[in-house]
Image (tube, rainbow, N blue to C red):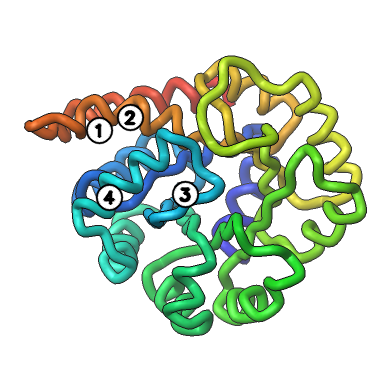
Amino acid sequence: MNRIAAVFTRLKKEKRKALIPYICCGDPTMEFTKQLAITLAQSGADIIELGIPFSDPVADGPVIQKSAVRALAGGATLDKIFTIGKQIRAQVSTPLVIMTYFNLIYVRGIKNFIKDAKFSGIDGLIVPDLPVEEGKVLLEAAEKEGLALIYLVTPNTSAERIKLIAERSRGFLYCVSVKGVTGARKELDKELANFVRRTRNITDLPIAVGFGIANPEMAGEVASFADGAIIGSALIEQIEEHITGSEIAYDQALDQAGNFIRSVREVL
């Protein structure tokens, strides 16, 4: 069983919900990314989403865009990310999911990308700009190596299309909470719970909600109707004040990230 599926099976038995933090690899250095991932795993993360910085991140809001700019300026590359993934895997058993845009997979070659990801200890992929109709080759390559290809659905996705996407998604289904890009919001959309319930009527896959979750209270609300909460921008905001000055305060950034994740873990 893939590590991602195993986590959701275990959490269901324990009557808990999955906490899935997102980090941008290489922001501001690869070594910091490694230490941050280990800190998150030790602080209660059930799955860790490793974002690959990209120059045109169409699904991401300003916080993650700035994070990607810092990472690219610091010299982050795909080869370095796969290397750091292997180092993280050597120290934690937490499932690791890559979030990337399809350009990077295409340029490297689908089979090469999947094999490199597998060798690095990666358990799944999220490719937000890949239409489900165009994903057959990637899905087949991922399944051959035991990786989960995780698709996204949004509040304006039709029921018919949700069914198609769910049939081709593995591990869990990513429900986008807003009609827009990533970024912490002041409150959840009033229709989010109904959207998740409609989606649950279509698929038996675990459902994790991302985009817009800003604090433990919002994560707790999501946990009342979904199987997991994905937190990215709010986590990056917690640490970026410590990693963007003339002196990078790694220890303070790691402490703040760990404390934030533990506070979210308590409500899930």
Question: Which three-letter amino acid code belongs to the residue tagged 3?
Answer: Glu
Q: Is disc 2 in contact with disc 4, using a CB cutoff of under 8 Å? A: no
Determine contact: label 2, label 1, CB under 8 Å.
yes
The image quadrant where one finds the C terminus is top right
Q: Which of disc 1 and disc 4 is earlier in sequence?
A: 4
Q: Position of residue 26 (x, y in %)?
A: 27, 51
- Relative to 66, 234 lies left or right: right
Quick check: 206 above or below 126? above
- Whether residue 223 sits left or right of residue 106 in the image: it is right
Q: Which amino acid does label 1 sit on?
A: Leu
Q: Please name which of the two marks, 2 or 4, marks the residue nearer to the observer.
A: 4
Where residue 250 sits, quadrant-wise, is top left
Q: Which label sits in the foreground, 4 or 3?
A: 4
**Label 3 sits on residue:** 49
Query: How far is the residue under mark 4 from the one under mark 1?
Result: 17 Å
Q: Picture coordinates of residue 214 (x, y %)?
A: 51, 23
Query: Crowdedness of circle 4 by 10 Å Cα count: few (<14), some, many (20+)?
Result: many
Count of marks placed on residues: 4
The one of 219 and 15 positioned closer to us in this rendering: 219
Where residue 257 is drawn, which disc sits there? 2
Mark 4 lies on residue? 71
Callout 4 touching callout 1 (CB < 8 Å)? no
Task: Classify residue 241 by image quadrant.
Answer: top left
Label ID, residue 254: 1
Which of 116 and 242 lies nearest the eye of the viewer?
Answer: 242
Q: Distance between the residues labelled 4 and 3?
A: 16 Å
Tell me the kind of residue under disc 2.
Ala
Q: In terms of secondary structure, where does tag 3 sit?
A: strand
Looking at the image, which residue is at 58% across and 35% down?
A: 211
